[in-house]
Amino acid sequence: MKQCFFNESIVFFYNNSGKELSTTWRPKDALVVGLGLTVCVFVLFTNILVITAIIINKRFHYPIYYLLGNLAAADLFAGVAYTYLMFHTGPRTVTLNVKTWLLRQSLLDTSLTASVANLLAIAVERHQTVFTMQLHSKMSNQRVCILIACIWLAALLLGLIPSFGWHCICNLESCSRMAPLYSRSYLIFWAVSNLVAFLIMMVVYLHIFIYVKKKMVRMSKHTSFHPKYRETMINLMKTVFIILSKYCVVVFEVKVLLLYRVDLI
């Protein structure tokens, strides 16, 4: 029968994985936490504004804006997760117990997975609208709500799996150095899942780019194209550009999360 170590301290798991755990505040720690909290406040404020604008403005009551609103909600959740991290990182990590450490990690993983899954849903929705030459999808509000619920269900499942057993607390040999209470197999599964989603998004947006480029070449050869057709294409590309910008932000979030895992937390 395997021995479990739920009552051990966080220091025990960090020592087991060979990861350094600082007990004093270094200038680097204070700088990172200070900048992190500033970014968190900005993220929380801006995403609250986005969600509020979508709710009160009837012009935004379309599937794409509901998905963008859900993306803002995922970012808002990420802001909360990173704020919690800022107050429980560096030397404060020593004060955590197993449950609070797993909660901290679950918040981060859930928020990032929700953002990635939502970006994938938006990519598929934009692909459909671009190829049918519609500015807004004909997807019903009910289907959008079901899709949003599935996104959060998938994100919660991926984020909470370690808390329900996929950890290394009962198998110290499988502990990761990056996240000392996480099993290496879970981290590989989580990383591959998000990587697959990113790759699918890249393929979808590449397909959109190639299609739109061909359309624009044809439009330039025929000056008699209806102005409404041209305007629709331009508006579609605007939304795609906004989404791609958000895609770059999420990639940045992934890098930051990996930085925290390797160094601070």
Image: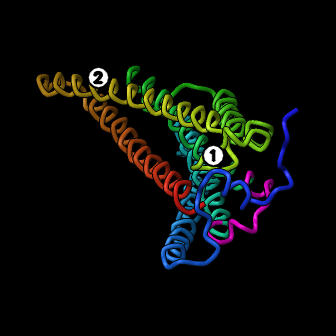
Q: How many marks?
A: 2
Q: Residue at x 76, y 63 (%)?
A: 96
Q: Amino acid at mark 1?
A: Asp
Q: Quadrant of the C terminus?
A: bottom right
* Label 2 Cα neighbours within 10 Å, binned few <14 / some 14-19 / many ≥20: some
Residue under label 2: 211
State left or right for residue 214 relative to residue 252: left
In terms of depth relative to the viewer, which is nearer, 92 or 86?
A: 92
Residue 207 versus residue 195 in the image, above or below: above
Q: Residue at x 74, y 51 (%)?
A: 102
In terms of depth relative to the viewer, which is nearer, 83 or 87?
A: 87
Residue under label 1: 109
Q: Secondary structure at mark 2?
A: helix
**Location of residue 203 (image quadrant):** top left
Q: Which residues are magenta?
A: 89-102
Q: Quadrant of the N terminus?
A: top right
In terms of depth relative to the viewer, which is nearer, 115 or 98?
A: 98
Q: Secondary structure at mark 1?
A: helix
State left or right for residue 13 relative to residue 37: right
Looking at the magenta stretch, what is its main secondary structure? Answer: helix
Q: Residue at x 63, y 66 (%)?
A: 89
